């Protein structure tokens, strides 16, 4: 989607003067990009029709920066379509009860752990409930996550009645002063009538303050059908879109919102407990437009980053003075923040590059070794690294010349990208787009 939109927008930007035909073909490209990303054809057509009307209304053709204005209109339209504002979950109640539903493997248990951790960090007293009576391993999985995030897990391994377990858990929560109960349920197939009835019964019995439907964003058009089936049965309050790591897919977000008209409330971008973000329609729109989810990245970074260090590095980035010492320091910070691949995926232009790579935190060992083998001067001014220095660095770090060359090249590209972003920011373009 990102590729196609980029292309469509380039068509507009590339031209000094924009003709009507040009807009028409760009609109067509945008529409195709949306349908390719599993947005229902009719929805995509409605969106692009509105975009065209707005473009005419706001005189895109005779504006100073037609391409920019067009991108802004697309961005606004997508934002609006995805609900406009970020939607919070309802955690009022004594206790508030959150029911988690969705297909097997969609990421319910992982999300339950993340949500528990998220709410705990807000100072709430949380109880996780393992309400999966079919797989004993499911209870263990939740227990491991609960332990990891420091939240108690309620389970009744012997009990084969999901309704009872959920009820018992809620009354136990009330007794022990827990304020939020998160009920993780068994995965079910939408076609499995018995299991659909079971979750309906659980819902009736515990009367949750919030029912969340968890869906794997990689399942494309199926995600929409599943959402519809679950919504018909459960009338859920919000959607959690999982597995959005690294990839810039927004198709599922767009179509689910339109088809079931329920807000997307959270997105999940990795297996680690930190990889949970509130869903911001405007950021998702930017992400779809290939801007990268910069704001989410910054927010997540702030949780773990040493703020002074971040400020210092940021200032250097702005002055285009970012060097290998800063790079090393950032790598180390990033490793504290969670999965590197998730984070890199949020940097503009990165998602595409790393999508198919197998990156984990260990992948950075050779990089750290190479940087450590550089002299302070080389770290500050990598341009002085000539052939003999490269040889020395490779030998010192236990790597080879190719690896050193690759790192130098990547670093150079990164600096170029930062420079480009700085220029964009300086000219106000980025701000206009991100607004
Ligand atoms: P459940 O059956 O719905 O409870 O799904 P699980 O929470 O057990 O998740 C199924 C698999 O997907 C596990 O291997 C998770 O680690 C993985 N998973 C869950 N959420 C995410 C995510 O946001 N990103 C990625 N990459 N994997 C995820
Ligand atoms: Mg599960």
Image (tube, rainbow, N blue to C red):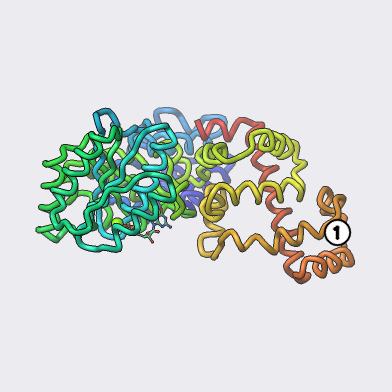
User: Of helix, strand and loop, which one carries label 1?
Assistant: loop
Q: Tell me the quarter of the picture where residue 106 sits.
A: bottom left
Residue 289 in the image: above or below residue 312: below
Residue in the foreground of this view, choosing between 106 and 161: 161
Confirm whether residue 206 shows in the render.
yes
| Residue drawn at (33%, 50%) of the image | 252
Residue shown at the point (27%, 39%) measured from the top left: 181
- Quarter of the displayed picture in which ligand 1 can be seen: bottom left
Q: Nearer the viewer, residue 269 or 427?
A: 269
Q: Residue furthest right?
A: 388
In the image, residue 307 lies at what x, y percent?
A: 64, 34
| Residue occupied by mark 1 | 385
Residue nearest the observer in this picture, 123 or 261: 123
Image spot of residue 163 (x, y percent): 13, 48
Q: Position of residue 309 (x, y in %)?
A: 69, 37
Seen in the image, is 70 located left or right of residue 135? right
Residue 83 relative to residue 275: left or right: left
Location of residue 230 in the rendering, given as x and y in whole percent from the top left corner: 19, 49
Of the pair 149 and 295, the residue shown nearer to us: 149
């Amino acid at each position: 989607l990102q590729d196609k939109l980029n292309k469509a927008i380039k068509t507009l930007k590339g031209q000094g003067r924009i003709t009507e035909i040009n807009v028409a073909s760009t609109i067509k490209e945008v529409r195709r990009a949306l349908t390719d990303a599993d947005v229902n054809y009719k929805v995509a057509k409605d969106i692009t029709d509105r975009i065209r009307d707005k473009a005419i209304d706001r005189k895109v053709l005779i504006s100073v920066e037609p391409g920019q204005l067009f991108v802004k209109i697309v961005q606004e339209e997508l934002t609006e379509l995805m609900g406009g504002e970020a939607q919070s979950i309802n955690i009022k109640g004594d206790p508030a009860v959150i029911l988690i539903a969705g297909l097997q493997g969609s990421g319910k248990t992982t999300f339950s752990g993340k949500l528990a951790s998220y709410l705990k960090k807000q100072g709430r007293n949380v109880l996780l409930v393992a309400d999966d009576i079919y797989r004993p391993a499911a209870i263990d999985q939740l227990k491991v996550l609960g332990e990891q995030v420091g939240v108690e897990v309620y389970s009744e391994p012997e009990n084969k009645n999901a309704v009872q377990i959920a009820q018992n858990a809620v009354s136990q929560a009330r007794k022990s002063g827990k304020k939020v109960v998160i009920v993780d349920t068994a995965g079910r197939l939408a076609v499995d009538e018995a299991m659909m009835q079971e979750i309906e019964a659980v819902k009736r019995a515990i009367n949750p303050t919030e029912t969340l439907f968890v869906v794997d964003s990689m399942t494309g058009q199926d995600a929409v059908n599943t959402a519809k089936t679950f919504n018909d049965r459960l009338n859920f309050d919000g959607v959690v879109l999982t597995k959005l790591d690294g990839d810039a897919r927004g198709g599922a977000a767009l179509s689910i919102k339109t088809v079931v008209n329920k807000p997307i409330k959270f997105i999940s971008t990795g297996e680690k407990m930190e990889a949970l973000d509130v869903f911001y329609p405007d950021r998702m729109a930017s992400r779809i437009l290939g801007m990268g989810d910069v704001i989410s990245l910054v927010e997540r970074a702030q949780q773990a980053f040493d703020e002074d260090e971040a400020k210092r590095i940021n200032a250097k980035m702005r002055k285009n003075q970012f060097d290998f010492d800063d790079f090393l320091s950032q790598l180390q910070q990033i490793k504290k923040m969670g999965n590197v691949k998730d984070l890199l995926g949020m940097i503009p232009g990165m998602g595409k590059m790393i999508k198919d790579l197998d990156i984990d935190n260990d992948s950075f060992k050779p990089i750290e070794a190479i940087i450590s083998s550089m002299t302070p001067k080389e770290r500050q001014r990598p341009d002085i690294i000539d052939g003999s220095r490269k040889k020395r660095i490779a030998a010192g770090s236990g790597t080879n010349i190719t690896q050193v060359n690759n790192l130098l090249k990547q670093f150079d590209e990164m600096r170029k990208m930062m420079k480009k972003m700085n220029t964009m920011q300086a000219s106000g373009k980025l701000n206009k787009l991100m607004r």
